[in-house]
Image (cartoon, rainbow, N blue to C red):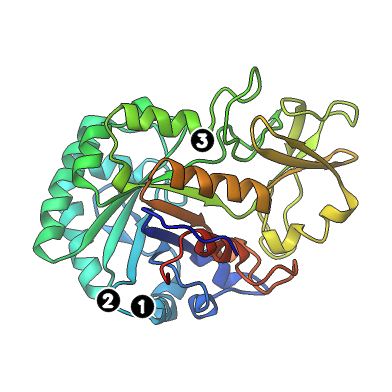
Amino acid sequence: MYVTAVAAQNIVCYYDNRAASYSTPTVPRNLSSTNCTHYVYDGIGVTAQGDIRILSSYDTASGFDDFQSLRRSSDTKLYVLLTSDRDGGKNLTNAIGGRSEKLVNNIAIFLEQYNFDGVEIDRRTNDFDKGALSRFINRLRSRLYMINRQLSVSVSPQFTDAYDITSLSLYADMINLHAYNFTSSTGTTTVANLAPLFSSTPNNVVSVNSTVTSWLAAGARRSKMNLVLATYARTYVLASEDQRAVGARSTGPGDAGANTKRAGLLARYEVCSLLNEYSTVSDAVTATTYYFKGKNWIAIETEDTLVQKLTYVLDNTLAGVGVFTLDLDDTSNTCGSGAYHTVGLVRQYFSFDQ
Protein backbone atom coordinates (compact mmCIF):
# COMPACT_ATOMS: atom_id res chain seq x y z
CA MET A 1 0.00 0.00 0.00
CA TYR A 2 1.26 3.45 -0.92
CA VAL A 3 0.97 5.98 1.89
CA THR A 4 2.31 9.50 1.99
CA ALA A 5 2.13 12.53 4.22
CA VAL A 6 -0.52 14.71 2.66
CA ALA A 7 -1.96 18.19 2.80
CA ALA A 8 -5.22 16.93 1.28
CA GLN A 9 -8.02 16.68 3.82
CA ASN A 10 -11.26 16.01 1.98
CA ILE A 11 -12.81 12.86 0.53
CA VAL A 12 -16.18 14.08 -0.75
CA CYS A 13 -18.45 11.20 -1.78
CA TYR A 14 -21.69 11.61 -3.70
CA TYR A 15 -24.76 9.39 -3.46
CA ASP A 16 -27.43 9.61 -6.18
CA ASN A 17 -30.90 8.88 -4.81
CA ARG A 18 -31.90 7.35 -8.16
CA ALA A 19 -29.86 4.31 -7.11
CA ALA A 20 -32.53 3.43 -4.54
CA SER A 21 -34.97 2.68 -7.35
CA TYR A 22 -32.71 0.38 -9.40
CA SER A 23 -33.76 -3.26 -9.72
CA THR A 24 -30.67 -4.01 -7.63
CA PRO A 25 -30.72 -0.90 -5.45
CA THR A 26 -27.99 0.87 -3.53
CA VAL A 27 -29.20 2.74 -0.46
CA PRO A 28 -27.17 4.90 1.93
CA ARG A 29 -26.69 2.14 4.50
CA ASN A 30 -24.88 0.12 1.82
CA LEU A 31 -22.15 2.79 1.87
CA SER A 32 -21.10 2.16 5.48
CA SER A 33 -17.64 0.86 4.54
CA THR A 34 -16.63 3.86 2.46
CA ASN A 35 -15.41 6.14 5.28
CA CYS A 36 -15.48 9.50 3.48
CA THR A 37 -15.03 12.85 5.21
CA HIS A 38 -18.04 14.38 3.44
CA TYR A 39 -21.11 12.74 1.90
CA VAL A 40 -23.35 14.58 -0.56
CA TYR A 41 -26.94 13.45 -1.11
CA ASP A 42 -27.96 14.07 -4.73
CA GLY A 43 -30.39 15.58 -4.76
CA ILE A 44 -33.16 18.02 -4.25
CA GLY A 45 -34.48 20.62 -6.66
CA VAL A 46 -36.08 24.02 -6.51
CA THR A 47 -38.90 25.84 -8.19
CA ALA A 48 -38.27 29.07 -10.08
CA GLN A 49 -39.96 30.81 -7.13
CA GLY A 50 -37.29 29.61 -4.69
CA ASP A 51 -39.12 26.76 -2.98
CA ILE A 52 -37.33 23.50 -2.22
CA ARG A 53 -38.63 20.62 -4.32
CA ILE A 54 -38.31 16.99 -3.21
CA LEU A 55 -37.52 14.93 -6.30
CA SER A 56 -38.44 11.48 -4.95
CA SER A 57 -40.85 10.23 -2.30
CA TYR A 58 -38.02 7.90 -1.25
CA ASP A 59 -36.13 10.87 0.19
CA THR A 60 -38.60 11.79 2.90
CA ALA A 61 -39.86 8.23 3.41
CA SER A 62 -36.45 6.81 4.32
CA GLY A 63 -33.62 8.24 2.21
CA PHE A 64 -32.76 11.27 4.34
CA ASP A 65 -32.99 9.27 7.58
CA ASP A 66 -30.96 6.40 6.14
CA PHE A 67 -28.30 8.87 5.03
CA GLN A 68 -27.79 9.89 8.66
CA SER A 69 -26.27 6.46 9.36
CA LEU A 70 -23.14 7.66 7.56
CA ARG A 71 -22.44 10.23 10.29
CA ARG A 72 -19.84 8.33 12.31
CA SER A 73 -18.64 11.36 14.26
CA SER A 74 -18.90 15.13 14.31
CA ASP A 75 -16.06 15.18 11.77
CA THR A 76 -18.21 13.44 9.13
CA LYS A 77 -20.22 16.07 7.25
CA LEU A 78 -23.46 15.35 5.43
CA TYR A 79 -24.45 17.67 2.59
CA VAL A 80 -27.38 17.80 0.23
CA LEU A 81 -26.92 18.75 -3.42
CA LEU A 82 -29.27 21.44 -4.69
CA THR A 83 -29.33 20.23 -8.24
CA SER A 84 -30.17 21.74 -11.60
CA ASP A 85 -29.70 19.03 -14.22
CA ARG A 86 -32.58 16.90 -12.93
CA ASP A 87 -35.09 19.62 -12.06
CA GLY A 88 -36.51 21.76 -14.78
CA GLY A 89 -33.40 23.14 -16.41
CA LYS A 90 -33.28 26.80 -15.42
CA ASN A 91 -35.29 26.65 -12.20
CA LEU A 92 -32.21 27.09 -10.02
CA THR A 93 -30.88 29.86 -12.23
CA ASN A 94 -34.20 31.71 -12.11
CA ALA A 95 -34.52 31.27 -8.35
CA ILE A 96 -30.99 32.59 -7.76
CA GLY A 97 -31.60 35.53 -10.07
CA GLY A 98 -35.09 36.52 -8.92
CA ARG A 99 -35.95 34.83 -5.62
CA SER A 100 -32.57 34.60 -3.91
CA GLU A 101 -33.64 35.77 -0.43
CA LYS A 102 -36.51 33.30 -0.37
CA LEU A 103 -34.23 30.51 -1.60
CA VAL A 104 -31.60 31.32 1.03
CA ASN A 105 -34.17 31.06 3.81
CA ASN A 106 -35.70 27.88 2.42
CA ILE A 107 -32.29 26.22 2.22
CA ALA A 108 -31.55 27.09 5.85
CA ILE A 109 -34.93 25.71 6.97
CA PHE A 110 -34.42 22.54 4.96
CA LEU A 111 -30.95 21.85 6.40
CA GLU A 112 -32.23 22.17 9.95
CA GLN A 113 -35.37 20.15 9.29
CA TYR A 114 -33.49 17.16 7.84
CA ASN A 115 -30.27 17.48 9.87
CA PHE A 116 -27.82 18.15 7.06
CA ASP A 117 -24.48 19.84 7.85
CA GLY A 118 -24.38 21.77 4.61
CA VAL A 119 -25.63 22.37 1.09
CA GLU A 120 -23.85 22.08 -2.22
CA ILE A 121 -25.09 24.40 -4.96
CA ASP A 122 -24.87 22.68 -8.34
CA ARG A 123 -23.59 25.13 -10.94
CA ARG A 124 -22.21 22.74 -13.55
CA THR A 125 -23.81 24.85 -16.26
CA ASN A 126 -23.19 28.20 -17.94
CA ASP A 127 -26.79 29.45 -18.06
CA PHE A 128 -26.50 31.90 -15.17
CA ASP A 129 -25.28 35.40 -14.40
CA LYS A 130 -22.06 35.09 -12.44
CA GLY A 131 -22.74 38.33 -10.60
CA ALA A 132 -26.10 37.01 -9.40
CA LEU A 133 -24.47 33.73 -8.36
CA SER A 134 -21.77 35.61 -6.44
CA ARG A 135 -24.31 37.71 -4.57
CA PHE A 136 -26.40 34.63 -3.80
CA ILE A 137 -23.42 32.70 -2.44
CA ASN A 138 -22.49 35.70 -0.29
CA ARG A 139 -26.02 35.91 1.19
CA LEU A 140 -26.26 32.16 1.66
CA ARG A 141 -22.88 32.04 3.41
CA SER A 142 -24.04 34.69 5.88
CA ARG A 143 -27.32 32.88 6.55
CA LEU A 144 -25.71 29.47 7.03
CA TYR A 145 -23.11 30.93 9.37
CA MET A 146 -25.95 31.85 11.70
CA ILE A 147 -27.06 28.21 11.98
CA ASN A 148 -23.57 26.64 11.85
CA ARG A 149 -24.02 25.05 8.44
CA GLN A 150 -21.54 24.75 5.56
CA LEU A 151 -21.60 25.65 1.88
CA SER A 152 -19.97 24.14 -1.18
CA VAL A 153 -20.37 24.72 -4.92
CA SER A 154 -20.17 22.20 -7.78
CA VAL A 155 -18.51 23.66 -10.86
CA SER A 156 -17.85 22.45 -14.39
CA PRO A 157 -14.45 22.19 -16.07
CA GLN A 158 -15.92 23.56 -19.28
CA PHE A 159 -16.99 27.05 -18.23
CA THR A 160 -14.21 28.71 -16.25
CA ASP A 161 -15.21 32.17 -17.50
CA ALA A 162 -18.78 31.68 -16.22
CA TYR A 163 -17.78 32.01 -12.56
CA ASP A 164 -16.62 34.80 -10.29
CA ILE A 165 -13.88 32.52 -9.02
CA THR A 166 -12.45 34.90 -6.46
CA SER A 167 -15.88 35.35 -4.87
CA LEU A 168 -16.66 31.63 -4.81
CA SER A 169 -13.27 30.95 -3.28
CA LEU A 170 -13.91 33.55 -0.59
CA TYR A 171 -17.41 32.48 0.49
CA ALA A 172 -17.70 28.73 -0.20
CA ASP A 173 -16.23 26.20 2.20
CA MET A 174 -15.43 23.91 -0.72
CA ILE A 175 -15.29 24.20 -4.51
CA ASN A 176 -15.88 20.79 -6.06
CA LEU A 177 -14.43 20.76 -9.56
CA HIS A 178 -16.13 18.01 -11.57
CA ALA A 179 -13.23 17.48 -13.92
CA TYR A 180 -14.69 14.93 -16.33
CA ASN A 181 -17.07 14.94 -19.32
CA PHE A 182 -15.36 17.85 -21.01
CA THR A 183 -17.65 17.35 -24.00
CA SER A 184 -21.29 16.30 -24.38
CA SER A 185 -22.18 12.61 -24.62
CA THR A 186 -25.60 12.99 -26.25
CA GLY A 187 -26.63 13.05 -29.88
CA THR A 188 -24.33 12.69 -32.87
CA THR A 189 -20.90 13.68 -31.65
CA THR A 190 -17.34 12.46 -31.41
CA VAL A 191 -15.91 10.01 -28.92
CA ALA A 192 -13.95 11.58 -26.08
CA ASN A 193 -11.88 10.49 -23.13
CA LEU A 194 -13.72 10.70 -19.83
CA ALA A 195 -11.16 12.84 -18.01
CA PRO A 196 -7.77 13.51 -19.67
CA LEU A 197 -5.27 14.57 -17.03
CA PHE A 198 -3.13 16.50 -19.51
CA SER A 199 -3.84 18.08 -22.88
CA SER A 200 -2.76 16.92 -26.31
CA THR A 201 -3.33 18.42 -29.72
CA PRO A 202 -5.83 18.40 -31.32
CA ASN A 203 -8.19 16.08 -29.44
CA ASN A 204 -7.72 17.03 -25.79
CA VAL A 205 -7.35 20.79 -25.67
CA VAL A 206 -9.12 20.95 -22.31
CA SER A 207 -7.89 18.70 -19.51
CA VAL A 208 -7.88 18.32 -15.75
CA ASN A 209 -4.56 20.13 -15.56
CA SER A 210 -5.53 23.01 -17.84
CA THR A 211 -8.77 23.50 -15.89
CA VAL A 212 -7.17 23.40 -12.44
CA THR A 213 -4.42 25.75 -13.66
CA SER A 214 -7.03 28.20 -14.97
CA TRP A 215 -8.97 28.17 -11.70
CA LEU A 216 -5.87 28.71 -9.59
CA ALA A 217 -4.67 31.52 -11.85
CA ALA A 218 -8.10 33.17 -11.51
CA GLY A 219 -7.86 33.25 -7.73
CA ALA A 220 -9.22 29.92 -6.48
CA ARG A 221 -7.78 28.82 -3.17
CA ARG A 222 -6.03 25.45 -3.27
CA SER A 223 -7.22 24.82 0.28
CA LYS A 224 -10.85 24.82 -0.91
CA MET A 225 -10.63 23.01 -4.25
CA ASN A 226 -11.49 19.33 -4.49
CA LEU A 227 -10.91 17.41 -7.72
CA VAL A 228 -13.99 15.24 -8.37
CA LEU A 229 -13.38 11.87 -10.05
CA ALA A 230 -15.94 9.90 -12.04
CA THR A 231 -16.52 6.27 -11.07
CA TYR A 232 -18.62 5.34 -14.10
CA ALA A 233 -17.92 4.48 -17.75
CA ARG A 234 -18.90 6.74 -20.62
CA THR A 235 -20.01 4.83 -23.71
CA TYR A 236 -20.52 5.55 -27.40
CA VAL A 237 -21.52 3.84 -30.64
CA LEU A 238 -18.93 4.46 -33.34
CA ALA A 239 -20.01 5.56 -36.79
CA SER A 240 -17.39 3.24 -38.27
CA GLU A 241 -15.44 0.32 -36.84
CA ASP A 242 -12.41 1.54 -38.76
CA GLN A 243 -12.41 4.99 -37.12
CA ARG A 244 -12.10 4.54 -33.37
CA ALA A 245 -9.43 6.92 -32.10
CA VAL A 246 -10.35 9.76 -29.76
CA GLY A 247 -12.24 12.29 -31.88
CA ALA A 248 -13.79 9.65 -34.17
CA ARG A 249 -17.41 10.17 -35.17
CA SER A 250 -20.11 8.63 -33.04
CA THR A 251 -23.77 8.07 -33.83
CA GLY A 252 -24.69 8.55 -30.17
CA PRO A 253 -24.40 7.10 -26.70
CA GLY A 254 -23.98 3.41 -25.96
CA ASP A 255 -26.76 1.17 -24.68
CA ALA A 256 -28.10 1.69 -21.18
CA GLY A 257 -26.96 -0.66 -18.44
CA ALA A 258 -29.28 -3.38 -17.16
CA ASN A 259 -29.43 -1.85 -13.69
CA THR A 260 -28.77 1.88 -14.16
CA LYS A 261 -30.77 2.19 -17.41
CA ARG A 262 -29.09 5.41 -18.59
CA ALA A 263 -27.87 5.58 -22.20
CA GLY A 264 -24.21 6.49 -22.57
CA LEU A 265 -23.37 5.52 -18.99
CA LEU A 266 -22.47 2.27 -17.27
CA ALA A 267 -21.73 1.76 -13.60
CA ARG A 268 -18.32 0.28 -12.89
CA TYR A 269 -19.98 -2.96 -11.77
CA GLU A 270 -21.84 -3.09 -15.10
CA VAL A 271 -18.77 -2.61 -17.26
CA CYS A 272 -15.87 -4.49 -15.67
CA SER A 273 -16.91 -7.94 -16.93
CA LEU A 274 -17.31 -6.56 -20.47
CA LEU A 275 -13.83 -5.11 -20.74
CA ASN A 276 -12.13 -8.50 -20.97
CA GLU A 277 -13.67 -8.84 -24.44
CA TYR A 278 -12.52 -5.38 -25.59
CA SER A 279 -9.28 -4.10 -27.05
CA THR A 280 -7.48 -1.49 -24.94
CA VAL A 281 -5.70 1.73 -25.90
CA SER A 282 -3.77 3.73 -23.30
CA ASP A 283 -2.19 7.12 -23.88
CA ALA A 284 0.66 8.22 -21.62
CA VAL A 285 0.45 11.88 -22.70
CA THR A 286 -3.16 12.39 -21.57
CA ALA A 287 -3.09 9.63 -18.92
CA THR A 288 -6.22 7.98 -20.32
CA THR A 289 -7.45 4.56 -21.38
CA TYR A 290 -10.30 3.61 -23.68
CA TYR A 291 -11.73 0.31 -24.88
CA PHE A 292 -13.39 -0.76 -28.13
CA LYS A 293 -15.15 -3.76 -29.62
CA GLY A 294 -16.78 -3.45 -33.04
CA LYS A 295 -18.69 -0.17 -32.89
CA ASN A 296 -18.82 -0.10 -29.10
CA TRP A 297 -16.46 2.41 -27.42
CA ILE A 298 -15.92 2.85 -23.68
CA ALA A 299 -13.93 5.34 -21.61
CA ILE A 300 -13.43 4.81 -17.88
CA GLU A 301 -10.87 5.57 -15.21
CA THR A 302 -8.49 2.66 -14.59
CA GLU A 303 -6.56 2.21 -11.38
CA ASP A 304 -3.50 3.70 -13.10
CA THR A 305 -5.32 6.83 -14.31
CA LEU A 306 -6.92 7.30 -10.90
CA VAL A 307 -3.53 7.02 -9.19
CA GLN A 308 -2.12 9.66 -11.52
CA LYS A 309 -4.94 12.03 -10.60
CA LEU A 310 -4.50 11.38 -6.88
CA THR A 311 -0.79 12.09 -7.24
CA TYR A 312 -1.68 15.27 -9.11
CA VAL A 313 -3.89 16.42 -6.23
CA LEU A 314 -1.07 15.83 -3.77
CA ASP A 315 1.57 17.47 -5.96
CA ASN A 316 -0.63 20.55 -6.37
CA THR A 317 -1.64 20.66 -2.68
CA LEU A 318 -5.36 20.76 -3.43
CA ALA A 319 -7.88 20.32 -0.62
CA GLY A 320 -8.83 16.79 -1.62
CA VAL A 321 -10.90 14.73 -4.02
CA GLY A 322 -14.52 13.91 -4.71
CA VAL A 323 -15.99 10.61 -5.86
CA PHE A 324 -18.98 10.86 -8.22
CA THR A 325 -20.83 8.69 -7.43
CA LEU A 326 -20.51 5.90 -4.86
CA ASP A 327 -23.50 4.04 -6.27
CA LEU A 328 -21.86 3.90 -9.71
CA ASP A 329 -18.63 2.46 -8.33
CA ASP A 330 -18.14 -1.28 -7.81
CA THR A 331 -20.66 -1.55 -5.00
CA SER A 332 -20.40 -5.31 -4.37
CA ASN A 333 -16.87 -6.28 -5.48
CA THR A 334 -18.13 -7.51 -8.84
CA CYS A 335 -14.80 -6.52 -10.42
CA GLY A 336 -12.70 -8.33 -7.80
CA SER A 337 -10.66 -5.42 -6.42
CA GLY A 338 -12.88 -4.77 -3.42
CA ALA A 339 -16.20 -3.01 -2.94
CA TYR A 340 -16.05 0.75 -3.49
CA HIS A 341 -12.52 0.36 -4.80
CA THR A 342 -12.24 4.01 -5.88
CA VAL A 343 -12.70 5.26 -2.33
CA GLY A 344 -10.37 2.55 -1.03
CA LEU A 345 -7.72 3.73 -3.45
CA VAL A 346 -8.21 7.34 -2.38
CA ARG A 347 -7.74 6.41 1.25
CA GLN A 348 -4.47 4.64 0.45
CA TYR A 349 -3.14 7.97 -0.78
CA PHE A 350 -4.88 10.26 1.68
CA SER A 351 -4.20 8.23 4.80
CA PHE A 352 -5.40 9.74 8.06
CA ASP A 353 -4.04 6.93 10.22
CA GLN A 354 -0.32 7.46 10.18
Q: CA distance from mark 3 to mark 2?
A: 32 Å
The crowd level at tag 1 (other Cα within 10 Å; few <14, some 14-19, many 20+) is some
The structure residue drawn at horizontal position 47% and vertical position 49%, both measured from the top left corner, is: 228
The structure residue drawn at horizontal position 63% and vertical position 40%, both measured from the top left corner, is: 194
Question: Given contact means CB atoms under 8 Å apart, are the residues at marks 1 and 2 in contact?
Answer: no
How far across and how far down the image is residue 60, in percent?
A: 38, 76
How far across and how far down the image is residue 16, in percent?
A: 50, 63
The structure residue drawn at horizontal position 47% and vertical position 51%, both measured from the top left corner, is: 86
Q: Nearer the viewer, residue 156 or 185?
A: 156
On screen, residue 237 above or below 213? below
User: Amino acid under label 3?
Assistant: Val
Residue, disc 2: 74
Of marks 1 and 3, the one in the foreground: 3
Residue, disc 1: 71
Q: CA distance from mark 1 to mark 2?
A: 7 Å
User: Amino acid under label 1?
Assistant: Arg
Q: What label does residue 208 carry, if any?
A: 3
- Mark 2 lies on a secondary structure that is loop
Q: Earlier in the sequence, mark 3 or mark 2?
A: 2
- Mark 3 lies on a secondary structure that is helix
Of marks 1 and 2, the one in the foreground: 2
User: Amino acid under label 2?
Assistant: Ser
